[in-house]
Image (spheres, grey):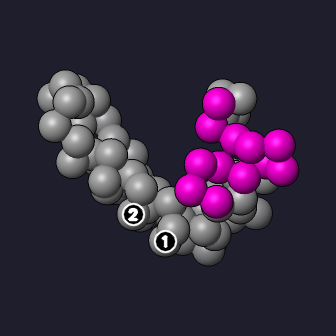
Amino acid sequence: MSNSEGDRDQDGHLQGGQDAPRDLIDFYRRWDNFRQAAVRLADRPDLSTLERQTISWMILLVDRIGERDLP
């Protein structure tokens, strides 16, 4: 999974100043920070029902992952 060039600055930071995750494990470990952005996205009025449901299901999926699931 990669971000478009427009989402990162020259130092690899995401818009908003947060460092981009290095990999899925890093994303999971920083989920508390990313979860807030995902919830805000799911609440956007310009999303279709399918888009909103997809984001909501992704949030539920990541919420179920625990340390025991990591290698």
Viewer can see residue 69:
no
Quadrant that contains the N terminus: top right
Viewer can see residue 22:
yes
Quadrant that contains the C terminus: bottom right
Decide which of 20, 61 is in the foreground and name it. 20
Label 2 close to label 1 by CB (< 8 Å):
yes
Write the start and end of the magenta stretch as one range: 6-17
Residue at x 71% of width, y 59% of height: 19
Residue at x 84% of width, y 50% of height: 11
What is the distance, in whole Å, between disc 2 and disc 1 at their CAs? Answer: 7 Å
As drawn, is 33 to the left or to the right of 22? left
Residue 20 coordinates in the image, percent (x, y): 70, 52
Residue 27 coordinates in the image, percent (x, y): 64, 58
Q: Does 7 appear above or below 62?
A: above
Q: Does 41 appear above or below 26?
A: above
Decide which of 62, 33 is in the foreground and name it. 33
Q: Label 1, on which residue? A: 32
Task: Give the quadrant of residue 48.
Answer: top left
As drawn, is 66 to the left or to the right of 40? right
Q: Magenta span: helix, strand or loop, mainly?
A: loop
Residue at x 60% of width, y 68% of height: 30
Q: Label 2, on which residue? A: 36
Residue 26 coordinates in the image, percent (x, y): 71, 61
Q: Does 64 appear above or below 40?
A: below
- The type of residue carrying mark 2 is Gln
Q: Does 68 appear above or below 44?
A: below
Q: How would you rate the neighbour count of disc 1 (Cα within 10 Å): few for under 14, some for 14-19, many for 20 or more?
A: few
Q: How would you rate the neighbour count of disc 2 (Cα within 10 Å): few for under 14, some for 14-19, many for 20 or more?
A: few
Q: In terms of secondary structure, where does tag 1 sit?
A: helix
As drawn, is 45 to the left or to the right of 17? left
